[in-house]
Image (cartoon, helix red, strand yellow):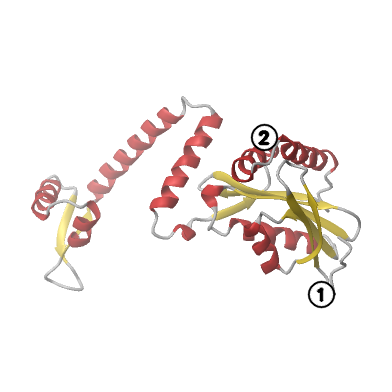
Amino acid sequence: DVGALRDAVAIDAGYLSRILARFEAKGLLRRDASDEDARRRVVRLTPRGRSVSGTLDRRSADEVGALLSTLPDAEQGRLLAAMGTIRTALREDPSRRAVILRDPGPGELGWIVERHGAVYEREYGWDVRFEALVARIVADFAEHRDPRYDRAWIAEVDGVPVGSVLCVRRDDDVAQLRLLLVEPSARGLGVGTSLVEAVLRFARDAGYSRLTLWTQDALRDARRIYTRAGFALADTEPHADFGPKMVGQTWTLSLDGGPANQGG
């Protein structure tokens, strides 16, 4: 629809009409009356117009690819993350962005450690002892993982990692949810809920009867996700293991429909 096209490109109606006339003269498009309203005009690409448009798209993609190929993988990742932040800020409905859960790729267990250290230091002032704890958890997972009972997930949006979670075996009956993280740029997209639901499905399929986790009183968003998933607070303990004073919380969830064991 010519009117919709004019609104989309935000240019003067007369200027748009002259552009369309030139394209029509070159055989790139045709203008017809709308089937719904004969007073309105619609434009359609001709076969030649589609060919020219495809050529322009390919050239544009090649130019962007050549530009990005000069950047190391890490810099490409930073660029994509920044573009995702811009897209989230400008999009009318950010919730429509697709969240993909997948296994960690090469180097992404290290990404989990790095992002936990950076995000929690910036937002809560937790010191390097927290990053060291995360590194030990990840190292133990990598060294001792049994695919039948342990699994890790990376959440991806627009091709960029934005979250993580682990499910690890405590004993034959109990699994532990660990290292739930959602990048600030991806909050509000349901990433945390999707990760927790993935852990619940895996734990049930693996035959666990109970799921437990340890979190902190300051992590209100995470606690809301746990509460919605059915976890119950089992134990609390004040500490300052990562610098600031906080209250550690143990939460549990029964996976067999019975009451959760409150032993933490």
* Residue bearing the label numbered 2: 107
Provide the secondary structure element on which disc 1 rests: loop
Q: Quadrant of the N terminus?
A: bottom left
Answer above or below: position of 69 versus 190.
above
Query: How many residues crowd mark 2 within 10 Å: few (<14), some (14–19), many (20+)?
Result: few
Q: Where 127 sits versus 225, above or below?
A: above
| Disc number placed over residue 232 in the picture, else none | none
User: Quarter of the image holding residue 73?
Assistant: top right
Residue at (65% x, 64% y) in the render? 224
Q: Residue furthest top?
A: 70
Query: Given the image, on which type of amino acid does mark 2 rest?
Result: Gly
Q: Could you tell whether 121 is left or right of 47 in the image?
A: right
Q: CA distance from mark 2 to mark 1?
A: 38 Å
Tell me if 162 is positioned left or right of 138 in this view.
Answer: left
Q: Earlier in the sequence, mark 2 or mark 1?
A: 2
Location of mark 1 (residue)? 257
**Rendered location of residue 142, percent (x, y):** 79, 39
Q: In x, y percent, where is residue 127?
A: 70, 37
Q: Is residue 130 above or below residue 176?
A: above
Of residues 144 and 31, the one drawn nearer to the viewer in this rendering: 144
Residue at left 39%, top 59%?
Answer: 92
Where's residue 2, x and y in %? 18, 60
CB under 8 Å between callouts 2 and 1? no
| Amino acid type, label 1 | Gly
Q: Nearer the viewer, residue 129 or 94?
A: 129
For discs 2 and 1, the disc positioned in front in the rendered view: 1
